[in-house]
Image (cartoon, rainbow, N blue to C red):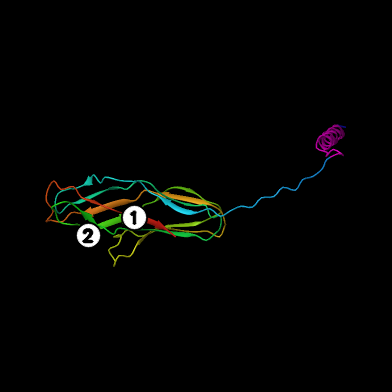
Amino acid sequence: MFSRRIGARVAGVAAAIAICTAVPASAVDSTVSFATTGGTLSVAVPASATLTGGSTVPGGTVSGALGTVTVTDARGNAAGWTASVYSTTGFTASGSTAITNSSVTYTPGATTSTTTPGSPTITAGTAGSPGANAGAALTAYTYANATAGGNTVSWNPTIAVVIPLTAIGGATYSGTVSHQVA
């Protein structure tokens, strides 16, 4: 008796749902379409950073975080990308010894944020000198994915600079570190 009541209630609920979702006899369909466009592949970096960690005396190593670097891939495909870093200037200070790229170390560090479809392979590059190898860019991160779709990947790299023993105390050094993505 109990199972008949439950069966009757379930059948009644199913009939009520079918009545509420039925399409009216006067319904007319419209076909709606649109085309998507491919977006861009870009990299965003902080405008500036100041290195304050470590030792700032001649012969010391000063270091610090560059700030968040973010690659945004809105192309909507599964092409993947490689982000690279380089420096064409090294570090210079008025009246003091220049610091070449071979004395600069860029360490990508771990990702700080990712938004991706599927199960991508996101790989940090090896710490090294950006541009120290005959002006070649250093790989910061690579992204590969069999699943198409937009993605963003962020990281906060560390930069360390060895100060030459011949540097003048009190000198203010500056240089440019550039990121690219392709």
Q: Picture coordinates of residue 28 (x, y %)?
A: 82, 43
The residue to which callout 2 is attached is: 100
Name which residue type carries label 2: Thr
Q: Is residue 24 magenta?
A: yes
How far is the residue under mark 1 from the one under mark 2?
15 Å
The residue to which callout 1 is attached is: 178
Report whether 17 appears left or right of 123.
Answer: right
Dividing the picture into quarters, in which one does residue 104 lie? bottom left
Q: Is residue 78 magenta?
A: no
Look at the picture and state if 110 lies above or below 26: below
Report whether 145 appears left or right of 18.
Answer: left
Q: Picture coordinates of residue 182 (x, y %)?
A: 44, 60
**Which callout, 1 or 2, points at the residue further toward the start of the chain?**
2
- Dot 1: element: strand
- Dot 2: element: loop
Q: Residue at coordinates 30% horizontally, 65% vertically from top-left?
A: 135
Asked whether 131 or 63 is in front, the reply is 131
Magenta segment: 2-26
